[in-house]
Image (spheres, rainbow, N blue to C red):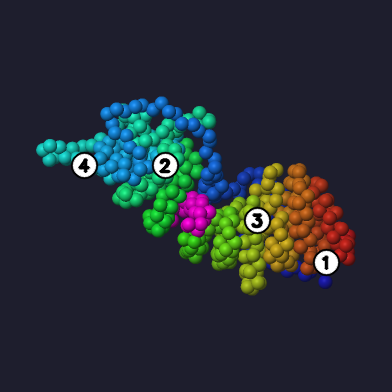
Amino acid sequence: MDDKEKRTVEEHSDEEEIVEAADELVKEKAHNEFTASENTAKYQFFVQNANFDSISDFKQILDLADVEDEKKYNLSNKEECAEFFSNCKNREYIILAIVLSVFELVPVGDFAYLKDSLTDFLPTITQLDKDGKEIYIQQTNPYLSLDVALSVVGGKMFVRDDGQQSIGYGENFEKVLSNIWIQFPDLRKPVIRWLLKVNDIAEYRTSFEVYQIVGAFIRIIKEDFQYAKQHVFDKLYSNPDNLGFLARLARELLEDKRFRNDTLNMVLKWTESESNWLWKSAFLICLNTYDPIVDERLRRAMINVLKKRMIGFQNSDLLFIVLFSEDVENVRSVVAAAFFDLYQSYNKRAKKDLALIYLRMVRYGYYQVNKSRIEIPFVTCDSKEQMNNICPVLTFIMLQYDLYRQLCYILQAYLEEIATYKVSSRTLSRITAFFYVLTRNEPDYQEDILLFLQGLKGDTAKLIYNKLMEIYQGKGGKGI
């Protein structure tokens, strides 16, 4: 029977996915019609940019003002910290101490915003005059020298190697935070509410770097993990814009053996949640590896999530997976395994739906290709296992003419574009392996694939053609 007769011609179930030529895909890509959505850029920002080793070199400025009429406190000392908060009548000093205990290094230009926003959350303190009447206590004093305030609370002025002036406690800041957190539990909720606000608008209103925001939350969480589960994480769950931020926090906590089990159990609950986005936070956590036990439990959980949700995914969900699969082999492996398991359990109708999902993911992968990013996830597979897991879906696509045609349009646009780039031998071998797998179970399709490659522009297709000819002839194939 002729190979084309073996393929069943069916109507495409998703009209918007039909393209009539590879040129249509090229035009769509050129016009940026398929770009990251649902704040994917923000997720990526928090997931990939919080480098805790990224602080620039800085040196301390030693010439702070000497305050003779104010007592100076060493807040890293438990007793002095308790005395300071109990006796201090100037909220400016209290606010400064809290800010510097939470953040490792605060640019002077950002301090005013952090101070003002924290003031809104701290409980007010009323005082009585000699007649027993309440008197107003000014929240902050704009005329109080920063040098004076730093001197009282034991803070320091620093200058970074880029010339930016900053303030902080230096190496003692975490001890100060611990003293405050343990001795003044009534301050916990206001400080957490403040940090949540800073997280919400920091990227728009301050120059804070990502590691500052993430680091602040991590330190608060580590002071009392069980408390943080209720008062930090539960608050973050209310806003899907925190998707990437949650993943960043969990990834940092999983690196700490003290919190690994609790954090893993929390993440596994995300995968079981009815939320339509918490699974994505868990997915992003798989961008890292931790230890064999954690990695395997995360892998199994994410495969189950994808199997449960795959058919119901929107285009934005598929694009999300593709964007974060591009550089991480174990993530691509998880997705490929889910494809394999789903295919084995589906009837023909559901298998076609799964094949359409695969084609959309390949298509979105093509839209991300550029000179520095040449490979398409789930086409240029990393391993034989990954390729074998995708193989059943590819075999189904080859048997359905409309699906096969759609795949060829994508591959044509892809191969003709990368022919203008420098393609490594590894990438070339992976693409060749993909084409071989397309025909491995149906040798009669070899001629189709070779003719397809012969008709494409550029050297990349020719190189793949030659490699395939060697493989086919070596295995007794017909070639053309």
How far is disc 2 from disc 4 in space, using C-alphas? 29 Å
In the rendered structure, find residue 93 and report the number of the disc placed on it: none
How far is disc 1 from disc 4 in space, using C-alphas? 87 Å
Query: What predominant SS class does the magenta segment belong to?
Result: helix
Q: Is residue 20 above or below residue 79?
A: below
**Measured from the top left, where is residue 227 in percent x and y?**
38, 56
Question: Can you tell which of label 2 and label 1 is closer to the viewer?
Answer: 2
Label 4 neighbourhood size at 10 Å, few (<14), some (14-19), many (20+)? few
Which residue in the protein does label 1 denote? 444
Label 2 neighbourhood size at 10 Å, few (<14), some (14-19), many (20+)? many
Question: Can you tell which of label 1 and label 4 is closer to the viewer?
Answer: 4
Secondary-structure class at tag 2: helix
Write the residue at 63% across / 44% down.
31
Question: Quick one: 346 or 32, which is closer to the camera?
Answer: 346
Quadrant of the rendering where the C terminus is positioned: bottom right
Which residue in the protein does label 2 denote? 173
Question: Quick one: 405 or 192, which is closer to the camera?
Answer: 192
Residue 251 forms part of the magenta stretch: yes
Q: Give the mark, 2 or 4, whose residue is nearer the N terminus.
A: 4
Which residue in the protein does label 4 denote? 126
**Which span is picked out in magenta?**
236-260
Label 2–label 4 contact, CB within 8 A: no
* Residue type at tag 4: Thr
**Measured from the top left, where is residue 453 in percent x and y?**
81, 54
Question: Can you tell which of label 2 and label 4 is closer to the viewer?
Answer: 2
Question: Can you tell which of label 2 and label 3 is closer to the viewer?
Answer: 2
How far is disc 2 from disc 3 in space, using C-alphas? 38 Å
Write the residue at 51% across / 52% down.
252
Secondary-structure class at tag 1: helix
Write the residue at 82% across / 68% down.
2
